[in-house]
Amino acid sequence: MYPEGLLFAPLQPALARLPRDRWPTHDELTALAQGVVTARGQPIHFVPPRGNSDRERRYYELRIAQSGEIETRTENWHDLFNALSWITFPKAKAAINAQHAAMLEEGGDAEARQRRPERDALTLFDEGGVAVSCDDEELLRHIVDFEWKRLFWTRRSELLAKMRFTAFGHGLYEQARAPFIGLVAKTVFLSADTSVDEGLARHFAERANFRSPRIMPPMPVLGVPGWYPDTERESFYDDPVHFRGSRRRDKKIR
């Protein structure tokens, strides 16, 4: 029932503990999240959605911070992957949620109706982000400059030795069940010697790190070696639509 493959590797420990022949219940997901808390110390538990009013949707993140309750639809891949992300990356998810909640409290209804750029960035990464763990500035520069074939094919041996990609966004996991050319993720660069969960938590603790979605370089997800069958063919990286060309070298890496 559950997806497999390198892209889904971070979720496998949690997936292995789920029922194999049916969807998990809210209680089963909550049991897997034992010990996971929000930044305000509230234990996480997964609950049925309360309703569909605009106000409830706008304050979804604030409810999580205040009560630990995460509204989760049953038999829904998007919400299941969100639950699994909380279980897999508890510190990072708590840090992202804490920033949403703080900004909602600061801005009130105006912020709830229209997100500021920082919350747009948080949402984009939470839904479709990939952490790139690497200390080689030259390899990271290939992402910033859209030099995809050079990174993924020409320098593959160096990439495999020095760079690690970790899918984070729960929307990305949902889309990867039926991957399509054009699937793109926002990236955050982390040091190679830190855990992804801790590294992302530290990254999102500082608002200057996500002041706009534009500071997170996009990356064609299916180019990562092993994340898609065609990555074993050099010609795959010649597709100019999926692998768009370089940008100017005027952007910072970190």
Image: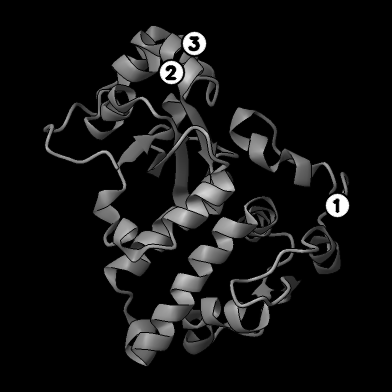
The secondary element bearing badge 2 is classed as helix
Q: Secondary structure at mark 1?
A: loop
Q: Residue at x 74, y 75 (%)?
A: 47
Q: Earlier in the sequence, mark 1 or mark 3?
A: 1
Is residue 241 visible to us here? no
Spatial distance from mark 2 to mark 3, Cα to Cα?
Answer: 14 Å
Can see residue 160? yes
Residue 53 lies, with reference to residue 183, above or below; the image says: below
Q: Secondary structure at mark 3?
A: helix
Q: Is residue 224 above or below residue 200?
A: above
Residue appearing at x 54%, y 86% in the figure: 56
Q: Which mark is residue 125?
A: none
Relative depth, front residue between 105 and 170: 105
Q: Residue at x 70, y 37 (%)?
A: 3
- Mark earlier in primary sequence (2, 3): 2
Residue 8 to residue 210: above or below:
above
Give above or below for 68 relative to 239. Answer: below
Closer to the chain start, of discs 2 and 1, is 1
**How much space separates mark 1 and mark 3, taking CA atoms?**
34 Å
Residue drawn at (60%, 58%) of the image: 91
Specify the quadrant of the image occupied by residue 222: top left
| Few, some or many residues within 10 Å of mark 3 (<14, 14–19, 20+) | few
How many residues crowd around disc 1 within 10 Å: few (fewer than 14), some, or many (20 or more)? few
Residue 85 % position (x, y): 63, 53
Q: Amino acid at mark 2?
A: Leu
Left of 89 or right of it: where is 245? left
Disc 1 target residue: 22
- At label 1, the amino acid type is Arg
| Residue on which disc 2 sits | 159
Q: Position of residue 227 (x, y in %)?
A: 54, 26
Residue found farthest to the bottom: 109
Q: Nearer the viewer, residue 208 or 235?
A: 208
